[in-house]
Image (cartoon, rainbow, N blue to C red):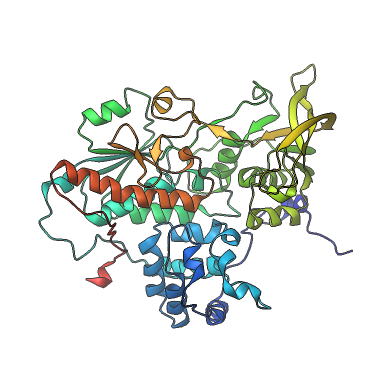
Amino acid sequence: HPVRDHAAAKVAAADPWERDYKFLSEREALSEAMRCMKCADAPCQKGCSTSIDIKGFIQSIENKNYYGAAKIILSDNPLGLTCGRVCPVSVLCAGSCNAAFTDSGAIKIHELQEFAVRAFKEMGVTQIPDPSLPKDLPKSYETPIALVGCGPASVTAASFLGRMGYKNIHIYEKKPYGGGLAASEIPKNRLAWEDIEWEVELMKQLGVKVFHEKEVGEDGLGLESLKEQGYGAIFLGNGLSKPKKALGDIYDAPNVYHSKGFLPAVCETTKQGMVEGATELPKLSGHVVVLGIGDTAIDCARSAFRRGANRVTLAFRRGFSDLRANDDIFQPAVKDCCNFIPYSLPQKVVFDSNGNATAVEFIHNLPESDDPSDPHYQPTGDKMTLPCDHVITAFGCENTQGWVKKVSNQRGHINVDYLTMQHKEVPWIFAGGDNLGHMNLVDAVNDGKIASWNMHKHIQAQSGIDVGETPQLPGFHTPIDE
């Protein structure tokens, strides 16, 4: 049997947080671009949440026009570099690729996207508003706009609004750094801080201001007070801040973590330059049990190995056929030698007399239906106890703040029209990202993209200006285009 690279051994490596796969070299990128068949109907573009002209940017790479390729990408997706790293391409663009049926498989679209945008990043060129904008825009373009949270959805919305020419775009971020979940919950081996920081800086080059360590709901900063300050539209990109407490108050134990605490501690201590004076996360050891099977749970499991765990087990209530994690995240966890226990619904965490978690009790949770789209899981009553040295929960998050609940629906999501991202009852509120229940970062980017146009439409309507129904979002521009 071939010897696997056990993740525990990586702790002793020079850099246990090295990226999961190498950059494409220029030669590899050109070769991969030439494989693309440039399909007339471009099914890959239809599979892209942000509708990037994939065929177009790959053609530009093939012609060695890396600047042009990056412009195509960033015009539709201001987080083109981040998405090139972490997009679930197997279920989006690459999953629709006609080349998937060839011996070499689907085109490595995400790697080509990252190659093009990284090449542009190294050029050191700045972003500017659309040069074709009139010099004397109406007064309505000076209307203040507030965005809550500096994550992917807000960065995207602010970028498009800045490209349109809005002058007073303000982001309120509770952390001392921007990037949201991409910065604080995606480990360094999957996404480097320098890439996120660069994308936030591109946004700032459009005049967007970010106010750090400003949390809505604290110090008199609320939605109504922001409205009273003159903000014409407010975008909520605040994510989901608290773990669900399905197992009760277990997080006081010194060896029990939740993803909302564990991953930020991991990222803040390993992504150099992101935050000063980050608290070192206690070193893990022995057997770590992770509860959940989404992308976040797998990030927790793989990070646990890199924090010293000898064995990591992901236990989850579903089966392998309907994992929440996509293959691009799941397969590296298999290579890292994570263990997986399906059909296991956690019931309680067992503690010793000192208050340390020693085991997790589960009940078997089996499907009653043969329909893969609706397995209809039901607990059987059969129990199992899994001993452990540490527990990390990653089975969902929620917002518990009172101000969020006031604008949310019964499912706990911000109550918006998904076609416009505009609140159904409060027309000056818009939202996007995790707080709508979306699971992928690229979907949060698209939320911000949709919301930006409808925020623009709402603000202009207040001044009696009709911008039309069809979105006309400006593309990415630099001083080279002037």
Left or right: residue 249 versus residue 428 is: right
In-front residue for pair 445/288:
445
In-front residue for pair 306/182:
182
In-front residue for pair 481/240:
240
Quarter occupied by the N terminus: bottom right
Quarter occupied by the C terminus: bottom left
Residue positioned 69% across, 29% down in the render: 256
Residue positioned 77% across, 31% down in the render: 379
Residue 56 x, y percent position in the rendering: 42, 74
Outermost residue on the left side: it is 136
Residue 393 x, y percent position in the rendering: 66, 34
Query: Which quarter of the picture shows residue 210?
Result: top left
Outermost residue on the top side: it is 353
Left or right: residue 127 versus residue 150 is: left
Outermost residue on the right side: it is 1
Label total for image: 0
Residue 244 seen anywhere in this rendered image of the structure: yes
In-front residue for pair 409/149:
409
Residue positioned 56% across, 33% down in the render: 397
Residue 284 seen anywhere in this rendered image of the structure: no
Residue 359 x, y percent position in the rendering: 80, 28
